[in-house]
Amino acid sequence: MVALPPGPRFILRHLHYIAFPPTVAFLTINIANWLLGVTVPTWVAAILSIISYPAILFSYIALEERRWRRSAAAHGATLPPIVKKTDFNVVGDVENRFPRDMLFRVCEKYGNTFLLEIFFVKRFFTSEPEHVKAILATDFGSFEKGPGFRDQMKSLLGVGVFNADGEMWKFHRSMARPFFSKDRISHFDIFDRHALDALQQMKTRLNEGYAVDWQDLVSRFTMDSATEFLFGKDVRSLAAGLPYPPTSDIARMQTYKPEADEFSSTFLEAQIASSKRGRYQQAWGLNEFWKDKVESRKAAIDKFINPILTDALRKNAEKGQDVDSKVSEEDTLLSQLLKVTDDYNVIHDETLNILLAGRDTTACTLTFAVYRLAEHPDVLRRLREEILEVVGPNRRPSYDDIRNMKYLRAVINETLRLYPPVMIYSVFMMHRRKDLWGADALKFDPDRFLDERVQKYLTPNPFIFLPFNAGPRICLGQQFAYNETSFMLIRLLQQFSAIEFVPEVAPESMVPPGYADSPGSDGSDRVWMGNHLTLYAKGGLWVRMSEAQEE
């Protein structure tokens, strides 16, 4: 059965809303004619049918707001303030502003919880830890992602764990949880192989005299690591080589895209297209009326995934269901899922969901960690001293090494605080609130996770720091992400002793005028942050690095 395009599907789903206003107008005209003997001209009937839409819409909005207020009063509560449209401009140069700049400014006027009206739909906004705690933990059962979110994300995430509620969500969690055991996530062979490849390519490019896009490099590293971890086979995105700075002659001469980049580039395009749907709320289908912009980009993704899944399902059927549910050292997430289900769609969507989480979030953390190390050479020097003291200049780090490196964990946590990969629940804003983190909340300072500020701010209120969510939806791959990020930073600083941020080699990565003039910035931000499903640096993160002399 051929699926309808998004536009017609939206219209059919909302046909009763479309038909209701003119039906009311038609019945009103006929009742007036019957009771009063009034003959309404056709042109008047047509006008009444047209104005019935805004009349009924605004009546519904007023009645809904009244119902909300009465419901809140019945619970001994009040509705948060409703933001005036003049205070929240959703058009203009939003893309050129500091992330969530408008929301930071709205918070200054309305507080940390308020109501926004977007396309006639009211949305609650909060960056209040107690509210987030209720959503994620203490009142978890009362909240779900809901049909609107699932509809927006279905083209990309399907029925995977990040697009599921209720029993389906529990099923997905139970499938994936055994795979993220300590023994499995502390097996570093995959990390080491791809990290050494990436860093060797970076050395070669730097020795040629060119800057390197660190964000691109770690995106390839995490993509290859994640696909091998999940499927037992990587997409070999590092094999495509690293890009040259856009201002270089060699970059201007390149006119082709390596085939190894196809998976990664279309994966990114699909995420961007998915995230843009949120701007239109439930009406996103009208913006993609005849063509699903995400589905059209899935072909390159499925070209890699589908043969692997088909082959794995065939082999699994030939040998019979494995009754041993324990995760072995040779297992991939795919082989683990095959022990639980043989549903092709469930396995396909679950692996794609975990790939999105495992690749993008870690790449984001590594990107902004190196940006901050470049901007804070004192932090870099101190971190490198810890690495050389614990691991040395050449040895591969172990799980115990990483666990014992307190400053490394503090650097990662501080990066996650200022640059949380996923910004839902307004974590980005909550992590930058001075009343929650102190007067220096906008400053990059890893020591806040080591000194008395831990006991002053974080210990009494742990829900102010949520880079990995919390409660039943806490990220299963949290420790995996810490391990991969730690491993790459250790390998990097074993070989390099200084980092310089050089955005001028890629003009599209330079922040626009006035970018850092935001209540959410300390005024020193030089990296242009953007976000689709996760946070990233627009135009890349271009750096030069100095190789370390033998210690």
Image (cartoon, helix red, strand yellow):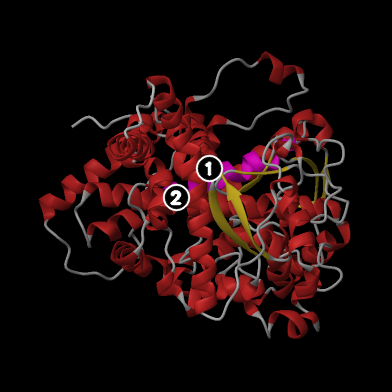
Query: What SS does tag 1 mark?
Result: helix
Residue at image point 50% right, 38% down = 54
Residue at image point 68% right, 70% down = 409
Q: Position of residue 499 (x, y in %)?
A: 81, 48
Counting residues from the start of the chain, the first of labels 2 and 1 encountered is: 1
Residue at image point 37% right, 68% down = 177
Residue 387: in magenta span: no
* Residue bearing the label numbered 1: 275
User: Splitting the image into 4 quarters, where does residue 26 fall?
Assistant: top left
Which residue of the protein is positioned furthest toward the front in this rendering?
Answer: 37
Q: What residue type is disc 1 on?
A: Ser
Q: Could you tell me if residue 480 is visible in this image?
A: no
Viewer-proximal residue, 89 or 316? 89
* Residue bearing the label numbered 2: 355
Viewer-proximal residue, 102 or 355? 102
Q: Could you tell me if residue 2 is visible in this image?
A: yes
Determine crowd level at label 1: few under 14, some 14-19, many 20+ residues with C-alpha closer than 10 A. Answer: some
The answer to the question of whether label 2 and label 1 lie on touching residues, with beta carbons closer than 8 A, is: no
Residue 217: in magenta span: yes
Give the residues in magenta. 212-229
Does residue 219 lie above or below 73 as drawn? above
Q: Position of residue 106 (x, y in %)?
A: 74, 56
User: Splitting the image into 4 quarters, where does residue 192 fall?
Assistant: bottom right
Label of residue 238 in the image: none
Q: Quadrant of the C terminus?
A: bottom right
Q: Position of residue 316 (x, y in %)?
A: 17, 52
